């Protein structure tokens, strides 16, 4: 006897089927297992932060960057400290986690107002994905802000997300973030910060929108752990008095947002039929890492086995929140009721891991996990206990490759230095006849999304320093089309979208176009495929002619037909490609053995 077979009645017939696997702890359900787990030293306010999803009716324009020389920066000691959070990263490494963070009573982090006439802004960031460390009032409406670095590191400050209350409308404020570590930024090219007003959301149904004038990004003369610091400064006015507002580098998408979204899918009687949500593993802090399987049920067992697979992952870098919105666009398309979505589900098995680094997302890191290291440089690591999500993802894909063909892998990212969306791929230098084939999918995507996706920005060289990335590791495992899809934090500089920011709906639309391009790329009618291949071959011939012309005119040249992927990198994570912080801390406590010469008697 077994309890694993259940019987359905259809048209008067008894249809046996296997019972659905039981959810172990409920990735999306209520209960202690679904609560976000924080490092035990982190203070967390009990409030849950909610934002409405909104897109502006017309694209928001970029601004004219301000002049850094006009920004007068004061020393912090000349101002008044109005907010300071406990620096959890004082601990050398992660030790243990707890649901809800620290057990100790919540300390007062913000200034206590003296009365109704006190106009000092009240800051807060001890919530999911928040990362403000300190705020200093250096003028009547002028504040200098310091961001917390990624936990257990002294680096990686680019993402920001914090809350401000006790606002005054019509007053010109200036905020200056003083400890950013990247030498270049899209803020130099017109990007503006994001603002969310609770009163604006309640009254006008307006969500995150771009604000700021005199936006400047410049080196400020300070240092942090021997790295030069850069400042981001902007002026603005609040829309309402006595409002609560949030500021962010990009549209926030937290671990709680993901759980809410997955819960909606699971409770939907239609979508839950072809989308199964399971637990891939637990993160280092014990947070559940969900994996989604999306496909239409096969009518016969053999048909299900023959379906090839497509794998998509996101948020390995927690501060790249735009990747989550692209992932949401992909999921919304695949789970929709259109004929194209049904065709994709009939043709493929989709495996999607929407958040590879939930610990980093929860604590407000920009790049690292709680190991203090960049996960996207550690796909080759064998340290399962330190990198559980990477190990589980590789293991899942390895098993997938053994049972069916994995046609495409795509890891979703955000880029802080370039406009548009673009792809990093892996060129097949050992097979010249196949060398252009990895470029066909990106070229098709550029044709489907001409005002947002730039094929000219795509790179395909496999560099040695990128061997630890998911894209290269999965390509080495035999996935022929292994990509990193980068999306700008700013916006587009092409077509009718030139000079505008990306909105949430734009990022979701990019996910739609990704799915639409899958249909074009794997269409049994190979007309589009061959046209793109011929176009790429013509491009290569033109590049060869240009190179020959350069050589004839200038002699030796440094120009190569093989493009250089790292020329404008979106990351500076090479300095995070080290053993986990736990091992560094352990090694520092080891006492070196004292060496001494052995006597002749001891040697014999």
Image (cartoon, helix red, strand yellow):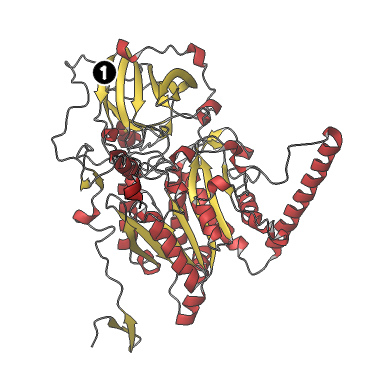
Q: Is 448 rendered above or below residue 546?
A: below
Residue 166 in view of the camera: no
Q: Is 90 rendered above or below residue 100?
A: above
Query: Crowding at label 1, few (<14), some or many (≥20) Cα neighbours within 10 Å?
Result: some
User: Relative to 578, is 279 on the left or the right?
Assistant: left
Q: Is 300 rendered above or below residue 270?
A: below
Query: Foreground: 172 or 533?
Result: 533
User: Relative to 77, is 517 on the left or the right?
Assistant: right
Q: The N terminus is located in which quarter?
A: bottom left
Query: Foreground: 8 or 256?
Result: 256
Query: Foreground: 559 or 166?
Result: 559
Q: Which of the 4 image quadrants contains residue 452?
A: top right
Q: Is 217 rendered above or below residue 264?
A: above
Residue 162 rendering spot, x and y as whole percentages: 32, 31
Looking at the image, the residue that sits furthest to the left is 105
Q: Residue at x 50, y 63 (%)?
A: 310
User: Relative to 487, is 13 on the left or the right?
Assistant: left
* SS for dot 1: strand
Q: Which of the 4 image quadrants contains residue 547?
A: top right
Residue occupied by mark 1: 81
Residue 174 rendering spot, x and y as whole percentages: 39, 18
Q: Residue at x 45, y 54 (%)?
A: 313
């Amino acid at each position: 006897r077994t309890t694993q077979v259940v019987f359905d009645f259809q048209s008067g017939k008894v249809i046996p089927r296997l019972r659905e696997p039981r959810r172990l702890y409920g990735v999306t359900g209520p209960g202690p297992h679904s609560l976000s787990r924080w490092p035990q030293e982190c203070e967390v306010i009990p409030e849950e932060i909610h934002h409405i999803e909104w897109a502006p009716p017309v694209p928001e324009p970029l601004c004219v960057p301000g002049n850094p020389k006009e920004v007068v920066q004061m020393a912090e000691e000349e101002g008044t400290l109005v907010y300071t959070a406990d620096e959890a990263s004082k601990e050398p490494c992660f030790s243990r986690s707890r649901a809800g963070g620290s057990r100790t009573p919540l300390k007062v982090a913000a200034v206590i107002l003296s009365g109704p006439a006190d106009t000092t802004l009240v800051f807060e960031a001890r919530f999911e994905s928040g990362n403000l460390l300190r705020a200093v009032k250096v003028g009547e409406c002028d504040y200098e802000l310091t961001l917390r670095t990624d936990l257990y590191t002294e680096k990686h400050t680019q993402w920001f997300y914090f809350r401000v209350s006790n606002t005054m409308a019509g007053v010109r404020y200036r905020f200056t973030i003083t400890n950013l570590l990247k030498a270049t930024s899209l803020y130099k090219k017109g990007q503006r910060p994001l603002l969310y007003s609770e009163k604006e959301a309640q009254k006008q149904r307006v969500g995150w929108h771009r604000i700021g004038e005199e936006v400047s990004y410049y080196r400020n003369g300070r240092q942090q752990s021997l790295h030069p610091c850069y400042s981001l400064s902007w002026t603005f006015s609040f829309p309402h008095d006595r409002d609560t507002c949030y500021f962010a580098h990009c549209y926030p998408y937290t671990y709680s947002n993901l759980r809410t979204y997955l819960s909606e899918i699971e409770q939907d009687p239609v979508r839950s039929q072809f989308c199964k949500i399971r637990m891939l593993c637990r993160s280092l802090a014990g947070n559940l890492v969900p994996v989604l399987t999306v496909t239409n049920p096969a009518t016969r067992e053999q048909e299900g086995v023959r379906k090839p697979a497509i794998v998509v992952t996101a948020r390995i870098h927690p501060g790249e929140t735009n990747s989550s919105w692209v992932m949401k666009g992909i999921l919304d398309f695949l789970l929709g009721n259109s004929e194209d979505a049904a065709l994709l589900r009939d043709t493929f098995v989709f495996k999607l891991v929407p958040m590879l680094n939930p610990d980093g997302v929860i604590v407000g890191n920009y790049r690292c996990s709680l190991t203090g290291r960049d996960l996207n440089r550690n796909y080759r690591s064998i340290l399962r206990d330190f990198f559980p999500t990477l190990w589980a993802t590789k293991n899942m894909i390895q098993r997938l490759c053994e049972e069916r063909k994995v046609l495409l892998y795509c890891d979703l990212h955000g880029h802080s230095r370039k406009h548009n969306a673009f792809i990093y791929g892996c060129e097949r230098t050992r097979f010249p006849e196949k060398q252009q084939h990895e470029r066909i999918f990106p070229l098709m995507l550029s044709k489907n999304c001409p005002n947002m996706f730039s094929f000219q920005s795509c790179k395909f060289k496999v560099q040695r320093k990128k061997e630890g990335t998911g894209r290269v590791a999965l390509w080495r495992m035999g996935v022929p089309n292994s990509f990193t899809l980068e999306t700008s934090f700013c916006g587009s500089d092409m077509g009718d979208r030139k000079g505008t920011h990306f909105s949430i709906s734009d990022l979701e639309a990019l996910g739609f176009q990704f799915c639409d391009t899958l249909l074009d790329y794997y269409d049994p009618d190979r007309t589009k495929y061959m046209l793109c291949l011929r176009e790429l071959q013509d491009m290569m011939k033109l590049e060869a002619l240009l190179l020959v012309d350069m050589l004839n005119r200038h002699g030796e040249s440094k120009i190569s037909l093989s493009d250089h992927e790292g020329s404008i990198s979106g990351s500076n994570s090479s300095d995070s490609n080290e053993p986990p912080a736990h091992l560094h801390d352990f090694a520092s406590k080891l006492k070196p053995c004292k060496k001494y010469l052995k006597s002749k008697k001891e040697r014999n």
